[in-house]
Amino acid sequence: MFKKAKQNRVFQDVVEQIQDAIIKGKLKPGARLPAERELKDLFNTSRGTLREALRVLEQKGLIEIKLGVSGGAIVKRIDAEPIVESLALLIRSGEVSIEHLSEFRIKIEGSLVELAAMRATKEEIAELETMFNQAKDYYEKNDWENFLKTDEKMHTYIGIMTQNPVFQFVQKTIHDNIHQYYDEYLPMNKERTLENLTDFEKIIEAMKINDAKKASDIIMDHVKRFSDKMQEKTRSKSNFTMQA
C-alpha cells in the first residue's frame, strides 16, 4: 500500500500517501495503521518526520492517535467536523462581520429553506411545528434564553429537512454560534420575539402548501430585517464611542 517517500519532499509525501489510502477506501474507518517502526521502514523516513506527518493527519480528522500498549493510529470516519470547527471559531472570533454573515445567510438560507420546503415530509413539518409551539410557549413566559435555543433548533432542523449534509453542517454551525451577535447587538424582547415567531409561522404555513418560493422569500426578508437592526445598533455604538 505504501512506498518509500520521495526524499525531496518526505514529510508531504508521507501525509499524501496515507491520506490517499484513507480517501480511496484502502484503509477503512476503525483500521489500525502499521506500527510506527514498520511505517518508518516503509516510508524510509525518520521517526520525527513520521510522527509529524501523523499529527497533521490527526489534525485533519483522518486518524486518531491512541496511547498505550493497545494504542496506535486509528483511521477515523471522514466527516465535516474539522470544517465545522474552523467555521465556528471564525464566527466566535468576531472576524466575521454582521454584514458578511447577513449577506451569506440571505443567499444560503433562502436556497436552504426553498429546498427544505420542496423535500420535507409531513412528519418533518409536524416536528418543526412542535418546535415552533415550544418557542411560542417560551415567548409567553418571557423566557428569552430558551426561546433562542429553540429558535436555533428550528433553523438547524430546516437544514436536516433539505436532506443535504452540506447544508445541514453549515446551518448548524452558523446557528450554534450566531447568538453572540444577538446578545451584543439585538437582545430579545417581547416585540422582537413576536416578530421572529410570526415569520416562522408563515414559513411553516408555506411549507404545508409546498410553496417553496414563498418560504424562501420569507426567510430572506427575515434575515435582512434582523440584520439591518443589528447593523443599526452597531453604527449607534460606533458613533457613541467616537463622540466619547
Image: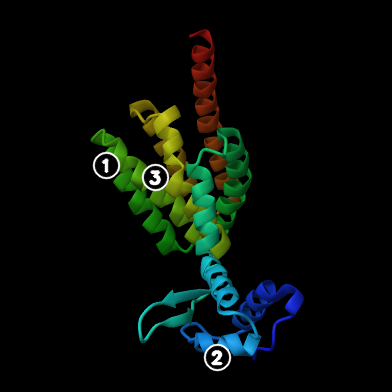
Q: CA distance from mark 1 to mark 2?
A: 61 Å
Mark 2 lies on a secondary structure that is helix
Please tell me the numbered disc located at residue 151. 3
Q: Which residue is mark 2?
A: 38
Q: Residue at x 51, y 26 (%)?
A: 229
Instruction: Work out whether 77 lies above or below 150.
Output: below
Q: Residue at x 58, y 77 (%)?
A: 50
Q: Between tags 2 and 3, which lies in front?
A: 2
**Residue 160: percent from the left, percent from the top?**
48, 61
Q: How is the image coloured?
A: rainbow
Amino acid type at mark 3: Asp
Amino acid type at mark 1: Asp
- Of the numbered discs 1 and 3, the one sitting upstream in the chain is 1
State the residue lying farthest toward the top.
Answer: 243
Q: Which residue is mark 1?
A: 137
Q: CA distance from mark 2 to mark 3?
A: 52 Å
Q: Residue at x 59, y 81 (%)?
A: 22
Other-residue count near label 2 (Cα within 10 Å), few / some / many at <14 / 14–19 / ≥20: few
